[in-house]
Amino acid sequence: MSIVFFLFQQTMFFSIPLLIVALGGMYSERSGVVNIALEGIMVIGAFFGIFFINIMQSGNILSGNLLFFITILVVALIGGIYSMLHAYASINMNADQVISGTALNMFAPAFAIYTARMIQGVQQVQFKNQFRIASVPFLGDIPVIGQLLFTNTYISTYIGFVILLVSIFVLYKTRFGLRLRACGEHPGAADSVGINVYKMRYIGVFISGALAGVGGLVFVIPTSTNFNADVAGYGFLALAVLIFGQWQPLKILGASLFFGISKTVAATYAIVPVLTNLGIPDYIYKMVPYIATLILLSFTSKKSSAPKAAGQAYDKGAR
Amino acid sequence: MSNKKKTFFKSEIMDSFLSSFTAIIIGLLFGFIILLLSNPNQAFAGFKTILMGGFSGGAKGIGDTLYFATPIILTGLSVGFAFKTGLFNIGAPGQFVVGSFFAVYVGILFPALGLVHWIVALIAGTIGGALWGLLPGILKAYKNVNEVIASIMMNYIGIYLVNMLVRDNAMIFDTLRNQSKFPHKSAIIPKMGLNLLFPGSSVNGGFFIAILAVIVIYFILNKTTFGYELKAVGHNKDASRYAGINEKKSIVLSMVISGALAGLGGALLLLAGAGKHLEVVDILPAEGFNGVPVALLGMSHPIGVFLSALFIAHLGRGGFYLQRLNFVPEIITIITSSIVYFSAFALIMKNYVQKIRKKFQKNNEGENANDDISENKAIENIEEVE
């Protein structure tokens, strides 16, 4: 039974970053801007975040989960600012959003490595992992749920769920959310009732940058003690999760959990007795989530719920 | 009429070239500023080294530029071809790695092929890449699966599959170094005299094969009905179907050809005899991803891709020699990515330049002003399709 708890806890470490970044991508695409720069923004967020933590820890200025929380806020801001490059190119300059996104993806790891080596001599940025919560005070003692959700965890898990709930509320229950969605489906109609499509899209991209930055940080912290300018393609995986989740928050949660569980099984099957007895090669486990996604996508893509105006520059004159 | 068409045609290409050129200048300037900020004393020397590129190493350096350009010419063609037909082939790394596996497999296990061994191995690599592009193509054409996601999935499936096949095959796997073994000597691409022109470098006949691929793709895209149909489907799927083109078949074939090009790139790299092996690590080949900026800078035109691949390889060599001055070579990627970023603006700049040019020419033509405008628009529309 403890294995089940362990697997669940590990799944959170893989799923929550995917969830956060995919939700970010959702904001951007729902407003009409395709943001494939998520990978690059994750790297920038993780780099600045880990560097910030490194400095704060070395100087003994801040530590523990307070530091983690503050870093999340810092990184959200930085991610949002970095994504403004993409926003400006896509919205004001009517650039091909793929080009702009690709440029940001290329720039981020190069910048992270260059800056790290210029400042501290080596490429890897170290940090001390003081953020693991062994058990949340009262909630961790609840019989089953306590062990599943409140032991051996990080505050990022809860922040991820909060972001999810806020996103569902904002997207479907507020005027802002409605206007945002309108800009992605039919910007001309939105414009005709007075919504500033450009401003909406800027906000959408900023939120996606902020969330992607946070996602990058949250990806590195539970799984490592250093950052090496790479997020293992999670930004692209988040795009897959976004499309798999049909641009809807709850389905995105489902898709991220699916991926998270698959990745966890691939990484930990050696300690699960049932699975080791099957004798399946390790690479097959690694391939399963991707193959499964392809199969599932081939059944669900006929009626794609993609925002209709995603990827197209908005031209006021065309109305 | 044809005279006017020629001048407008020239100006279209000129505008594209000017906009790419502007992006390159801005990108280089940005890189120079970063050099200044990191190490002001060495900044000028560093910038000069970047601009000199492979020339810093003499004949060997130039040869190495050609060697490093070869795989990205192919992946650039791959991505550019897909772009021209309306698809974003981000699966180039996966196709590249599967192609290199097929090539290495034939290269190690079929020495009996003798003289044609390397040719067969290259063809095998091309087929491998083609197969890997086939599935996303089918899924896109018949099931409306977004080719970006399908290709990303295939990238990961590809690297894991190849890693598994290499590691579990005793004939191919070098356990000590965790990579594939050397292909048989007869599978290595012949030097074709390039080792005499550029002694000491790794350049080989693969460069000529890359040039051949550029010519073939140019021919397909611009001189055949097939290429015309592919481009038409890229512009407007529904209109093409209305015109009688089988758009599903076109999409599949586009991805297959795109994959084949990337696979050939992988084969050319692994059979170059320069010591490149298939390492069993879960990392996608950078040459695959670098096809995207190469294609974007080259405006997806085969000749543009060729020149932009040479340029990016040239800068890359500059970054290599930059290490002598204690700069971090990643500055090159910073410069390249800035160039790509500004090339996105360049499109809007190109429209702006075209408008100015047209206004200028309209004023010059005096009485026939009105005729020229409508003729211009008609000619411009014809060129837009190309």
Image: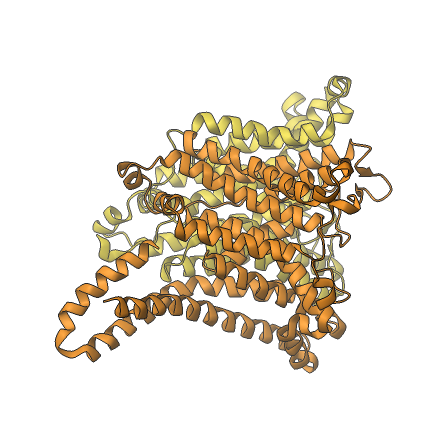
Chain colours: A yellow, B orange
The image shows residue B17 at horizontal and vertical percentages of: 43, 68
Q: In which quarter of the image is residue A267?
A: top right
Q: Which residue lies furthest to the right in this view?
A: B176
The image shows residue B210 at horizontal and vertical percentages of: 59, 54
Q: In which quarter of the image is residue B195?
A: bottom right
B101 w.r.t. B285: above or below: above
The image shows residue B348 at horizontal and vertical percentages of: 36, 64
Left-right relation of B43 to B180: left
Left-right relation of B237 to B270: left
Which is nearer the eye, B172 or A283? B172
The image shows residue B257 at horizontal and vertical percentages of: 51, 42
User: Residue sitting at 46 percent across and 67 percent down?
Assistant: B20
Left-right relation of B342 to B161: left
Q: Can I make out residue B117 in this image? A: yes
B209 w.r.t. B89: above or below: below
Quadrant where the N terminus of chain A sits is top right
Which is nearer the eye, A273 or B264? B264
Q: Can I make out residue A70 in this image? A: no
A126 w.r.t. A140: above or below: below
User: Residue sitting at 31 percent across and 68 percent down?
Assistant: B6
Which is nearer the eye, A293 or A50? A293
Q: In which quarter of the image is residue B259?
A: top right
> How many marks overall?
0
